[in-house]
Image (cartoon, grey):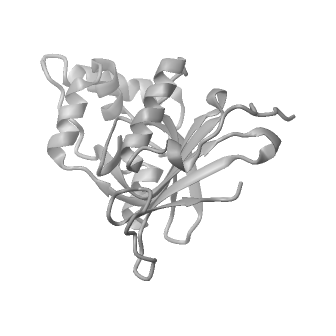
Amino acid sequence: MRNEYAADLGLTEADLAADWHAQFERWFADAVAFGLTEPNAMVVGTADAAGRPSGRTVLLKGYDPDGFVFFTNHLSRKGVEAAGNPYASLVFPWFPMQRQVVVTGRIEPVDRATTEEYFASRPRGSQLGAWASPQSQVVPDRAALEDNYRVAAERFADASAIPAPPQWGGLRVRPDSVEFWQGRAGRLHDRLRFRRADEGDPSDDGDRAGVAGWIVERLAP
């Protein structure tokens, strides 16, 4: 199974925005305008203390120059792994556009006020689901989940606002690298990466990124 990518598409250094955030904003707007189903869906990769990886699809709920934010149960597999081994990867698989964005960086909890503000914006059913589901834990059957949901619905039946569960909250991935991948013909894809500069890197004076502390690199496909 193989699809040939379009020859007339490409990503050059001259095409890049001044920094990774502006470039992601540009491509995310393209994904929305293209009509992709859930363009904010991303594959989140974490690993346990032994380095054994796990991945799952999660919805991005915010991004800014500090990083990418999503929400979860902190007692879920990804929540536990993020706490014990605080590094993660994100992949935005925009296949119909022949694009993807790959992020790596440190993961950390957001402040409680941010969690509560976002939780208050969720549909009531989703709020109840957060109380009902012991995410990633083994449950005996579907009926157990539905019983938990009924209990939560009864508990908050008279509440005009449902609070966020104490074990539920936001996580932010602060990127060390953000790679923009554009498919090209002949599998000579374009891969341009914004990477946070390390000690020992050449001076970034005049660097294409235009932002101190970041380097732009082209990777072989």
Q: Quadrant of the C terminus?
A: bottom right
| Residue 213 x/y as whole percent | 35, 66
- Residue 140 in picture, x, y percent from top left: 53, 37
Q: How many marks?
A: 0
Q: Is residue 160 left or right of residue 4?
A: left
32 or 82, which is in the foreground? 32
In the rendered image, the vertical position of residue 41 relative to residue 90, given as above or below: above
Q: Nearer the viewer, residue 83 or 192?
A: 192
| In front of the other: 117 or 75 | 117
For the point 51% across and 64% down, the residue is 48
Residue at image x 54%, y 19%? 34
Q: Is residue 55 above or below residue 107?
A: above
User: What residue is rendered at 41% in x and 56% in y?
Assistant: 209
Foreground: 76 or 52?
Answer: 52
Snapshot quadrant of residue 155:
top left
The reply to whether residue 44 is in sight is no
Residue 77 visible in the picture = yes
Please tell me whether residue 152 is drawn above or below residue 177 in the rendered image: above
Please state the horizontal and vertical placement of residue 26, each as a whole percent of the image.
Answer: 43, 34
**Residue 117 appears left or right of 97:** left
Q: Give the residue furthest to the right.
A: 1
Residue, far bottom: 200
Residue 123 shown left or right of residue 31 in the figure: left
Q: Identify the residue at horizontal 35%, vertical 25% (top origin).
A: 149
Task: Using residue 186 as the reference point, say whether residue 212 is left or right of it.
Answer: left
Quadrant where the image shows the N terminus: top right
Residue 2 coordinates in the image, percent (x, y): 85, 35
